[in-house]
Image: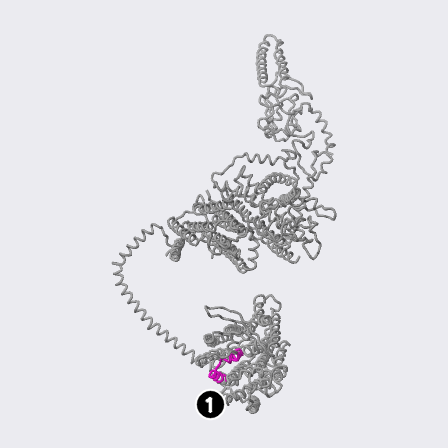
C-alpha cells in the first residue's frame, strides 16, 4: 500500500514536472523560452493547465460508444500504473516482489493496447480509429525488440525479478537472499580476474558487466520510444495527419488521464531500462580505494538513508532517460510507416536476436 | 564402433544431400566433396575391415517399431562378409567417382550424378551392413532406385529412360518374390534378424515352406543379379554412363543378389540350392553365348557380367558360397577395370570425334582396331583385366573360377543323377566361351588396323589420346588387383588363400580332381583365346549365322518375353475386357431394368402407403423443428447434434 | 454513421503493405551501410539539438538593429519576454498615425491618397482665417471630423508624404492592440460635435449674412456703402471656440478610454533634424 | 473468510459475469471487451492457484495477442451500415438445453468423483508446500522433459503464422 | 487453500457458457470467443489439478501448450474468417450454409 501511494504521488509529481520539462526542453532546442508566466520561470504552468483541464466539461460525443469511451482512459491508466507494481524504487520498496516481474511488465503493455483500441473505436472518429490502429500495430511490433532486449538482460542476470536484477548491479549484492556468494567481475569476465563486487558504482551496472548491453540498451530505448508513441515514432498521434490520434475526441479530465498514462508509460519504461541496464537504484559512483564514494552515496538496504538514496538514484536515472526521450523527440522528424516497420523487423529484431545469443554466450563463458 | 559404422554409412548420404541441396553453389559443383566423403567412408571401411577380419563381429540393434504384439528390431551386423563387401563397395565407388570427374566433365547434371552415386553407395552399404531382412529390403529398394536414376541419367535420350524403366520394373518382379520370402521367414521364425537366422540353430521348418522361402529370396537375386530368365534388363542398362556400368552393373549392385544368397545361405535347403545351381549354370552359359557375337563394346561386357554372375550363383548353388563370394570379389575388380577401360576407349573416341567434328557410334567394336598404339596404357590395363576374366593362370579370375568349377565338379560327383554333370560341363564350356569372347574383344579393339574408311576417319584415329590421370589411375589400380598375388600366393589354387579360408568352415576340403579341373580350365581358356585369334584374324566370323543371331539377340529373350508374357497378358486383358463389357455389364443392365420395373411397383405402394406415413412424420418433425429452429447447413447445428450425442453417450457410460 | 469505416481500414491495410518497401536511395543502399548512415545522421542530429540546449543558457538582449552587438548574437534563445522586454524601435519608426491638429489645414489630401480609405475628414469652413500653422500656413477650415481607422490602415505612408504642413506623421508606437475594433478608430478632430454644429451654424449664418449684406450692398450700391457691423459676430464665435477647445484635451469621444500615449510635443522640426542624420545612425 | 478466499470469489464472479457478457451482449465489441475481463479474472484465478507464470502468459497471449486479433477481426469484417457491430443470436432454447445439460452432467460428475478425496490429491494437499513461483520449474521442464513439445509448439506457431499470413494475404485470385 | 471442487465448478460454468456461445451466437467471431472460453475452462482445470501434482507443474506445462495452440488457432481462424468475409460478405454463420444439402 505504501508503494502504491508513493508511486501514485511520484507519478503525479513526475507528470507535472515532465510536462513542464517537455515544454522547456523543446523550447530550448528550438531557441525559445517556453512557459515563463506562471510562477518563477513558468514553473507553475503545468499546474495551471491541470487545473484548467480538471475544470473543463467532460464531453462525450453524441455518437460515441459511451461506456467504452468513458472506460478507456481508466483502463489505459490502470494498466500503466499497474506496471509500477513490480518496479523496485528502492532496495526495500517494491509493490510486489513477483518472480515474473519483467514478464509481468510486458503483459501490462498488452492491456494498454486494448485500452487504446477501446478509446480509438469508441470515439467514432476516423482519426481516432486510425490512430488507435496505428498505435496498436506499432506497439505490437515493437514489443518484439523490447521483449528481446529484456530477455537479453534476464538471460544475463538469470532472473526475471527486477529487485534481484537491481541488487546484482551494485555493492549490496550480498544483501539479497541467495546472492551471498556472488561476485561481480569487471566486464563480467571471470578470466579478467578483477573483482569489482565491493567497488560498485557504474562498474557493476549491466551495461558494464556485459559491454554489449550498451547496444541492447540503445535498442531497448528506441523500441520504448515506439512503445510510448513518442516522436519520432508518433505516427499514431501525428498531429499533422490525425489531429490527435486516439485521443482526438477526449477533453478535460479524461484527456488529462490519457496524458498522465502516456507520461507514466514513459517513466515506466525508462525506469525499466534503468533497472535492467543502468543499475537500478544503485549509485553510479564507485569506491575508489579509500574514497568510498559508493558507500557514501548509497546507504545499506533497510536503512532510511539507503532507501532515500536508492529512490534518488533511480528517479534521477529515469529522469535522465526521459530527458533523452525529449531530446530525441525534438530532434527527429516523424518516421513513415514503412520506415517504422523496417526499423523494427529488419534492424532491431535481428540485432536483438544476435545480441541475445551473445548475452547467453557471455553469461556462459564470461 | 557405432561411430565407425556411421562414418561408413553416412558420408555417402551426406554427399547426396549436400550435392542436391547446395551443390550448385560449391566450386566444381562439389565433386571434390563427394570424393572426399567417399574417401572418408572408404577409410572407415578399411579400418573396420582391419578390426573385424581377424575375427570377431559386431552387432548393434534397436527397437524399430511395434505392430501390435509383433516387434521389429533393426540394426547393423558386421561380420567378415560385411566388412569385405563394405570395403569392396566403398573402394570401387571411390575409384569410380575419381574416374568420373574426368569422364563426366561438363555434364549438365554433373552434381546430380555424383549425388546419385552417393545415394547408391549409401544404399549398397546399407544392404551389406543391415542385420535384418526387412531393413535389407529397404536398402535393396533404394539400390534399385539409384540404379534407376543412374541408368536414366541421360534422360534426354530415347533409350536411357526406357532402359531405366525396364530395369526398374523387372527388379520389381524379383522384389515381390523377395518380399514374400521375407514375410514367410518372419512368419516362420518370428524375426527377420539375419544373425539369428543364419547363425542360430535352424528351427524346424516345413519343407514346402522352406522351398518357398528359398525361392522367394532367390527371386530377389534373379532380378537383381540378372539371372535367367530376368537377365534382359542388364544389357539395356548399358544406356547409362560407363562409370555407372562399372560400379553398379558390374561390380557391386548386381553382386547384391549373390551377396544375399551368401548371407542367407543357411536358409536355403537342398532343393532350392539345386534350382539355384541350375539357374546359375544356364545363366552363365546363355550370357557367354550372347556375348560371343556382340559388336557393342559395353554390351559385350554386360553379357559377360551376366555370365559371370551366373558363375557366382552356380557356386552358391553347388554349396560353395565362399567360392561365389571370392569370384564376386575378383570379378568386381577386373570387370570394373574392364568397364572403366571401355569407358576410356569410348571417351577417347568421343573426344577425338569431337575434335575432328566427325560423328559416329563410338561403341561399335567393328569400327575400332589398332588402339594399342594410341592407347598403350589402356591396352595394358585392358589386357590384364581381360586375361583375368578369361581365367588364365596367374590372374585372379583363374583362382576364383577354378574354385567354382572345382566346387561344381565335386558337387556333381556327389549327386546321384548323371544329369548333374551338366552343371560342371556347361561351366567348363562357359569358361572356354569366356576366353573366346574376351579375346575377340581385345583383338577387335586393340589389335589390327583402324577399321574405318581412311578418307574420313584417319584424322579421328590420329586424334585419339590417352585420357587424364584421374581416369588412368583407378584403372591401373583395378588392373593391378586382377593379379593373383593379392588373393593367393599359390597361382593355381586359392584354397589356402586368405579369403577362401575365411569362408570355408570345414578344414577338410577335399581336393579331389583339383588337378583335372585346373588343367582343364587352363586348356579351355587358352584354346578359347586361340580360337578367338584364329577366327578374328581370319575374319571368318559368321555374324549372320544362326548362332550369331542367337547371340546378338540374346537368345531371343526379348522376343520370348514379348510373345510369352506380354502378348498373353494383352490377350488376357482383352478377354477380361470382353467379359466385362459383354457379360458383367449385361448383367448389370438387366439388374438395372429389373430394378426400375420393381421400383415402379414399389413406387405405387410408396405413394399410397409410405408417403402418408412419411408426410405425417415430416409434419411432426417440422413441428418439432419449428420448436428448435434447427437449421440445415449450419455448422452450429451439427455441433449441437454432435454435442448432444456426446452428452447422451457420457450419461449412458456414467450411469 | 459509419460510412467510411470499412474503406478506411482497407486503405490502412493497403497503405501499410504497399509502402513496406524501403526507400534506399541514399549514398549507402546496402543493409549495413543504411544502418551506419542512420546511426551517423541520428547522432549528428542529436549533437545539433544538444548544442542548442547548451546554448539556451544565454538569451538575446533586447538591443536594436542599430546596436553594434546586434549581429554578434548568433546563438542563444532568440525570443524575448515581450511585454517585459522589447526590441527598441528607432525614433523614426513608422507605426501608428498621429495628426497634429494644430498644424492641420484640413486639406483632405491625405484622405484622397489613402489607398484603403481609412481617413475620414469632414471639413467645416470657417468664416475667417482661424490661425496660422507653425510653418506659416493659414488654417481656414475646421475639421468637424478627422478619423483615422488604424484597423484599416496599411501603413503605406502615402498620407504623410502628401501632407503639406507635415502635421500627419507616423509614430513609433506599435503595440496598440484593442479588444474592441472600434477603438482602433482614432478621432483627431478638436471640435466636439456640438461645437461643430455651432461652427456650421455660424458659417451658414455668415453666408446668410454675407448674402444679406450682398443684397444690402447691392441695395446700398444703389444707396450708399458702410458695412461696419459685419465683423462683430464671427469674432465672438472664434473666442467661444477657443475656450471650449481647452476643456476636452483629448479628441472627443464619449465611449473611448483615454489614449495611452499620444505625445504631443513630437514636432516636425525634430524629424527634420533627424533626416540628415539618418546615415550616421545606420552606420 | 480469508483474503484469498474472498479474492477467489471476486475473481470467479468477474470471470463468470464477463463470460456471460460474451454470451449475451449483442454488440460484438462489447463481447470482446468483456472477454478482456474474463481473461483478467482467469489470470487472477491462476495466481490464486499458484501459477503465476501462467497468469502472466495468459495476459500476454490472450489479451495482447488473441483478443487484439479478435477485435481486429471484428473491425475488418463488419458491415458498415449498422449502428454497431451487432451479432444476433438464435437457437436460444437449444443453447440453453445443451449448456444446461452439459452443466448438469458436469455437476453430477464433480459430485460423484469427489476429487478432494481422490488418493493422490488428498496425499498431495496434505503435504502441500507454500506457494512459490513456478517460473524456474517451468523453465527447467521446458528445456528438459518437454523440450520436444516446446520445439514442436514453436514450429506450430511458425506454421500458423505463415498460414495465417498466406490465407489473409492480398492474393484475391486464389 | 481453495477447494478443488470450486475450481472444477467454475471451469464447468465457463465451459458451458462457451458452449452456449458457440451454439447460440451467429457471428463467427463470437463463436471463436466461445471456443476461447472453452479452452480457458480446460486450462483452469489443468492448473487447478496441477497444484496436487506430485510431479509438479505437469498441468501447468500442458496449459501452456494449450495456450500456444489457442494462439495459433486464433490466428489461423481469423485469417480464414477474413477470407470468408471477403467471399460471403458476412460473418453470420447461418448465412454461410454451403453445406446445406
Determine whether B412 is above or below B607 in the image: below
Instruction: Answer left or right for E17 relative to B301.
Output: left
Q: How many marks?
A: 1
Question: What secondary structure characterizes most of the magenta part?
Answer: helix
Residue, x 32% and y 69% (percent of image)?
B588
Residue E55 among those drawn in magenta = no
Specify whether B167 is left or right of B502.
Answer: left
Coordinates of residue C46 in the picture (x, y in percent)? 66, 46
- The stretch of residues the image draws in magenta is B255-280
Q: Is residue C170 left or right of E38 when viewed as pictured?
A: right
Residue drawn at 71 percent across, 54 percent down? A194
Residue A327 in sight: no
Q: Is residue B158 above or below residue A151?
A: below
Quarter of the image with the C terminus of chain C is: top right
User: B354 or A333: which is nearer to us?
Assistant: A333
Residue C14 in percent (x, y) is at: 52, 50
> What residue is pinned by disc 1?
B417
Give me the chain letter of mark 1. B
Q: Position of residue A160 (x, y in %)?
A: 59, 51
Residue A67 location in percent, x, y?
A: 48, 41
Residue B368 in view, yes or no? yes
Q: Is residue B259 magenta?
A: yes
The chosen color scheme is one colour
When asked about the image quadrant of residue C145, the answer is top right
Q: Secondary structure at mark 1?
A: loop
Q: In this view of the protein, which residue sits in the foreground, A140 or C265?
A: A140
Quick one: B373 or C53, which is closer to the camera?
C53
Few, some or many residues within 10 Å of mark 1 (<14, 14–19, 20+)? few
Task: Say if C150 sits above or below B355 in the image.
Answer: above
Residue that appears at 70% across and 48% down: A286
Residue closest to the eye, D165 or A49:
A49
Q: Is residue A101 left or right of residue B178?
A: right
Amino acid at each position: 500500500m505504501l508503494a502504491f501511494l508513493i508511486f501514485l504521488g511520484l507519478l503525479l509529481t513526475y507528470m507535472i514536472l515532465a510536462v513542464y520539462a517537455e515544454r522547456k526542453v523543446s523550447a530550448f532546442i528550438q531557441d525559445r523560452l517556453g512557459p515563463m508566466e506562471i510562477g518563477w520561470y513558468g514553473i507553475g504552468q503545468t499546474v495551471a493547465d491541470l487545473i484548467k483541464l480538471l475544470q473543463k466539461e467532460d464531453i462525450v460525443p453524441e455518437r460515441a460508444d459511451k461506456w467504452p469511451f468513458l472506460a478507456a482512459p481508466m483502463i489505459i491508466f490502470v494498466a500503466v500504473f499497474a506496471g509500477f507494481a513490480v518496479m523496485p524504487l528502492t532496495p526495500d520498496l517494491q509493490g510486489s516482489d513477483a518472480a515474473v516481474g519483467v514478464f509481468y511488465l510486458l503483459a501490462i503493455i498488452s492491456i494498454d493496447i486494448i485500452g487504446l483500441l477501446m478509446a480509438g473505436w469508441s470515439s467514432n472518429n476516423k482519426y481516432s480509429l486510425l490512430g488507435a490502429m496505428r498505435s496498436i500495430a506499432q506497439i505490437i511490433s515493437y514489443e518484439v525488440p523490447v521483449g528481446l532486449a529484456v530477455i537479453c538482460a534476464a538471460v544475463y542476470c538469470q532472473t526475471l525479478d527486477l529487485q534481484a536484477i537491481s541488487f546484482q548491479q551494485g555493492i549490496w549484492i550480498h544483501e539479497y537472499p541467495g546472492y551471498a556468494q556472488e561476485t561481480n567481475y569487471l566486464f563480467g569476465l571471470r578470466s579478467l580476474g578483477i573483482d569489482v563486487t565491493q567497488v560498485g558504482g557504474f562498474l557493476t551496472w549491466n551495461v558494464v558487466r556485459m559491454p554489449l548491453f550498451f547496444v541492447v540498451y540503445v535498442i531497448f530505448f528506441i523500441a520504448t520510444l515506439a512503445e510510448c508513441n513518442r516522436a519520432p515514432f508518433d505516427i499514431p498521434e501525428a498531429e499533422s495527419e490525425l489531429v490527435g490520434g486516439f485521443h482526438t475526441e477526449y477533453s478535460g479530465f479524461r484527456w488529462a488521464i490519457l496524458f498522465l498514462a502516456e507520461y507514466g508509460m514513459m517513466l515506466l519504461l525508462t525506469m525499466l531500462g534503468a533497472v535492467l541496464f543502468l543499475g537500478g537504484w544503485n549509485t553510479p559512483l564507485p569506491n575508489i580505494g579509500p574514497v568510498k564514494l559508493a558507500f557514501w552515496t548509497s546507504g545499506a538496504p533497510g536503512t532510511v538513508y539507503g532507501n532515500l538514496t536508492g529512490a534518488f538514484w533511480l528517479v534521477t536515472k529515469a529522469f535522465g532517460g526521459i530527458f533523452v526521450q525529449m531530446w530525441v523527440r525534438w530532434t527527429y522528424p516523424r518516421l513513415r510507416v514503412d520506415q517504422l516497420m523496417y526499423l523494427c523487423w529488419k534492424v532491431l529484431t535481428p540485432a536483438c536476436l544476435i545480441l541475445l545469443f551473445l548475452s547467453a554466450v557471455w553469461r556462459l563463458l564470461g | 564402433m557405432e561411430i565407425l559404422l556411421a562414418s561408413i554409412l553416412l558420408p555417402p548420404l551426406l554427399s547426396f544431400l549436400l550435392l542436391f541441396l547446395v551443390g550448385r553453389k560449391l566450386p566444381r559443383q562439389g565433386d571434390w566433396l563427394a570424393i572426399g566423403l567417399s574417401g572418408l567412408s572408404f577409410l572407415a571401411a578399411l579400418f573396420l575391415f582391419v578390426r573385424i577380419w581377424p575375427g570377431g563381429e559386431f552387432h548393434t540393434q534397436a527397437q524399430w517399431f511395434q505392430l501390435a504384439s509383433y516387434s521389429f528390431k533393426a540394426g547393423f551386423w558386421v561380420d567378415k562378409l560385411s566388412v569385405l563387401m563394405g570395403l569392396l563397395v566403398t573402394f570401387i565407388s571411390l575409384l569410380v567417382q575419381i574416374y568420373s570427374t574426368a569422364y563426366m566433365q561438363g555434364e549438365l547434371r554433373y552434381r546430380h550424378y555424383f549425388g546419385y552415386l552417393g545415394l547408391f553407395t549409401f544404399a549398397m552399404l546399407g544392404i551389406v551392413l543391415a542385420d535384418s531382412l526387412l531393413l535389407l529390403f529397404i536398402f535393396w529398394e533404394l539400390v534399385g532406385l539409384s540404379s534407376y536414376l543412374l541408368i536414366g541419367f541421360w534422360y534426354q535420350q530415347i533409350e536411357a529412360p526406357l532402359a531405366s524403366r525396364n530395369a526398374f520394373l523387372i527388379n520389381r518382379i524379383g522384389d515381390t518374390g523377395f518380399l514374400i520370402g521375407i514375410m514367410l521367414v518372419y512368419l516362420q521364425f518370428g524375426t527377420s534378424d539375419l544373425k539369428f537366422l543364419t547363425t542360430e540353430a535352424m528351427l524346424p521348418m516345413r519343407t514346402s515352406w522352406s522351398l518357398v522361402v528359398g525361392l522367394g529370396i532367390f527371386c530377389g537375386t534373379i532380378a537383381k543379379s540378372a539371372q535367367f530368365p530376368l537377365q534382359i534388363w542388364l544389357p539395356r542398362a548399358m544406356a547409362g554412363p560407363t562409370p555407372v556400368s562399372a560400379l553398379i552393373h558390374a561390380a557391386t549392385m548386381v553382386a547384391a543378389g549373390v551377396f544375399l544368397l551368401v548371407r542367407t545361405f543357411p536358409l536355403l535347403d537342398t532343393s532350392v540350392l539345386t534350382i539355384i545351381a541350375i539357374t546359375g549354370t544356364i545363366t552363365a552359359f546363355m550370357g557367354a553365348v550372347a556375348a560371343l557375337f556382340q559388336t557393342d563394346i559395353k554390351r559385350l561386357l554386360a553379357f559377360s557380367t551376366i555370365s559371370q554372375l551366373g558363375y557366382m550363383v552356380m557356386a552358391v548353388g553347388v554349396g560353395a558360397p565362399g567360392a561365389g563370394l571370392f569370384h564376386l570379389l575378383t570379378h568386381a575388380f577386373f570387370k570394373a577395370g574392364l568397364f572403366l577401360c571401355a569407358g576410356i576407349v569410348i571417351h577417347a573416341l568421343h573426344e577425338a570425334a569431337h575434335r575432328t567434328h566427325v560423328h559416329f557410334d563410338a561403341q561399335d567394336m567393328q569400327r575400332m582396331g589398332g588402339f594399342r598404339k594410341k592407347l598403350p596404357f589402356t591396352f595394358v590395363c585392358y589386357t590384364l583385366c581381360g586375361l583375368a576374366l578369361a581365367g588364365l593362370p596367374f590372374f585372379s579370375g583363374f583362382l576364383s573360377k577354378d574354385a567354382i568349377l572345382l566346387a561344381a565338379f565335386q558337387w556333381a560327383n556327389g549327386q546321384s543323377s548323371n544329369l548333374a554333370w551338366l552343371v560342371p560341363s556347361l561351366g567348363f564350356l562357359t569358361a572356354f566361351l569366356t576366353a573366346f569372347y574376351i579375346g575377340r574383344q581385345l583383338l577387335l579393339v586393340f589389335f589390327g588396323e583402324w577399321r574405318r574408311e581412311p578418307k574420313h576417319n584417319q584424322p579421328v584415329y590420329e586424334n585419339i589420346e590417352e585420357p587424364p590421370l584421374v581416369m588412368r589411375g583407378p584403372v591401373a589400380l583395378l588392373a593391378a588387383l586382377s593379379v593373383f598375388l593379392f588373393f593367393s600366393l599359390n597361382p593355381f589354387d586359392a584354397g589356402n588363400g586368405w579369403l577362401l579360408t575365411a569362408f570355408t568352415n570345414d578344414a577338410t576340403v577335399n581336393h579331389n580332381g583339383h588337378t583335372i579341373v585346373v588343367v582343364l580350365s587352363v586348356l579351355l581358356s587358352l584354346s578359347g583365346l586361340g580360337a578367338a585369334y584364329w577366327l578374328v584374324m581370319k575374319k571368318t566370323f559368321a555374324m549372320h549365322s544362326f548362332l550369331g543371331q542367337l547371340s546378338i539377340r540374346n537368345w531371343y529373350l526379348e522376343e520370348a518375353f514379348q510373345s510369352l508374357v506380354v502378348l498373353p497378358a494383352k490377350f488376357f486383358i482383352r478377354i477380361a475386357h470382353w467379359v466385362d463389357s459383354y457379360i458383367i455389364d449385361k448383367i448389370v443392365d438387366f439388374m438395372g431394368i429389373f430394378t426400375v420395373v420393381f421400383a415402379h411397383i414399389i413406387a405405387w405402394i410408396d405413394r399410397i402407403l409410405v408417403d402418408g406415413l412419411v408426410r405425417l412424420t415430416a409434419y411432426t418433425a417440422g413441428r418439432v423443428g419449428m420448436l428448435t429452429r434447427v437449421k440445415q447447413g449450419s455448422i452450429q447445428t451439427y455441433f449441437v447434434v454432435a454435442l448432444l450425442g456426446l452428452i447422451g453417450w457420457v450419461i449412458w457410460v456414467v450411469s | 454513421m459509419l460510412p467510411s469505416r470499412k474503406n478506411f481500414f482497407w486503405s490502412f491495410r493497403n497503405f501499410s503493405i504497399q509502402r513496406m518497401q524501403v526507400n534506399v536511395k541514399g549514398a549507402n543502399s546496402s543493409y549495413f551501410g543504411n544502418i551506419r548512415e542512420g546511426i551517423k545522421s541520428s547522432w549528428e542530429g542529436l549533437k545539433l539539438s544538444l548544442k542548442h540546449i547548451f546554448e539556451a543558457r544565454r538569451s538575446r538582449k533586447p538591443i536594436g538593429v542599430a546596436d553594434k552587438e546586434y549581429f554578434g548574437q548568433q546563438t542563444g534563445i532568440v525570443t524575448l519576454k515581450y511585454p517585459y522586454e522589447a526590441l527598441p524601435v528607432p525614433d523614426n519608426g513608422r507605426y501608428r498615425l498621429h495628426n497634429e491638429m494644430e498644424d492641420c489645414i484640413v486639406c483632405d489630401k491625405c484622405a484622397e491618397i489613402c489607398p484603403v480609405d481609412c481617413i475620414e475628414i469632414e471639413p467645416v469652413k470657417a468664416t475667417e482665417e482661424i490661425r496660422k500653422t507653425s510653418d506659416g500656413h493659414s488654417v481656414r477650415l475646421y475639421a468637424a471630423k478627422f478619423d483615422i481607422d488604424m484597423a484599416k490602415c496599411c501603413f503605406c505612408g502615402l498620407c504623410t508624404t502628401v501632407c503639406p504642413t507635415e502635421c500627419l506623421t507616423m509614430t513609433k508606437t506599435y503595440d496598440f492592440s484593442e479588444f474592441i475594433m472600434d477603438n482602433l478608430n482614432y478621432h483627431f478632430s478638436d471640435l466636439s460635435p456640438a461645437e461643430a454644429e455651432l461652427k456650421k451654424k455660424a458659417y451658414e449664418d455668415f453666408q446668410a449674412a454675407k448674402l444679406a449684406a450682398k443684397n444690402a450692398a447691392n441695395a446700398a450700391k444703389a444707396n450708399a456703402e458702410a458695412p461696419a457691423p459685419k465683423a462683430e459676430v464671427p469674432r465672438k464665435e472664434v473666442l467661444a471656440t477657443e475656450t471650449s477647445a481647452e476643456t476636452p484635451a483629448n479628441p472627443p469621444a464619449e465611449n473611448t478610454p483615454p489614449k495611452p500615449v499620444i505625445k504631443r510635443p513630437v514636432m516636425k522640426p525634430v524629424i527634420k533634424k533627424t533626416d540628415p542624420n539618418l546615415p550616421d545612425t545606420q552606420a | 473468510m480469508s483474503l484469498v478466499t474472498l479474492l477467489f470469489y471476486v475473481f470467479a464472479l468477474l470471470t463468470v459475469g464477463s463470460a456471460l457478457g460474451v454470451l449475451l451482449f449483442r454488440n460484438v465489441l462489447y463481447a470482446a471487451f468483456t472477454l478482456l475481463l474474463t481473461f483478467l479474472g482467469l489470470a487472477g484465478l491462476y495466481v490464486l492457484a499458484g501459477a503465476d507464470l501462467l497468469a502472466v502468459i495468459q495476459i500476454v497471449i490472450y489479451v495482447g495477442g488473441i483478443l487484439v486479433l479478435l477485435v481486429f477481426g471484428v473491425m475488418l469484417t463488419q458491415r458498415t451500415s449498422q449502428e454497431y457491430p451487432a451479432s444476433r443470436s438464435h437457437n436460444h432454447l437449444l443453447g440453453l438445453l445443451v449448456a444446461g445439460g452439459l452443466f448438469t452432467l458436469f455437476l453430477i460428475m464433480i459430485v460423484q468423483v469427489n476429487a478432494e478425496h481422490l488418493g493422490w490429491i488428498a496425499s498431495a494437499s496434505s503435504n502441500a508446500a507454500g506457494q512459490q513461483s513456478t517460473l524456474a520449474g517451468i523453465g527447467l521442464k521446458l528445456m528438459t522433459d518437454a523440450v520436444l513439445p516446446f520445439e514442436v509448439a514453436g514450429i506450430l506457431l511458425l506454421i500458423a503464422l505463415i498460414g495465417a499470413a498466406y490465407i489473409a494475404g492480398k492474393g484475391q485470385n486464389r | 487453500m481453495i477447494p478443488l471442487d470450486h475450481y472444477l465448478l467454475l471451469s464447468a460454468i465457463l465451459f458451458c457458457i462457451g458452449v452456449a456461445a458457440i451454439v447460440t451466437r451467429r457471428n463467427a467471431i463470437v463463436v471463436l470467443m466461445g471456443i476461447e472460453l472453452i479452452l480457458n475452462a480446460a486450462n483452469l482445470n489443468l492448473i487447478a489439478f496441477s497444484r496436487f501434482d506430485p510431479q509438479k507443474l505437469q498441468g501447468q506445462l500442458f496449459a501452456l501448450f494449450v495456450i500456444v495452440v489457442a494462439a495459433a488457432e486464433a490466428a489461423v481462424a481469423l485469417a480464414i474468417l477474413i477470407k470468408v468475409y471477403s467471399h460471403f460478405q458476412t460473418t453470420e454463420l447461418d448465412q454461410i450454409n454451403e453445406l446445406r444439402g
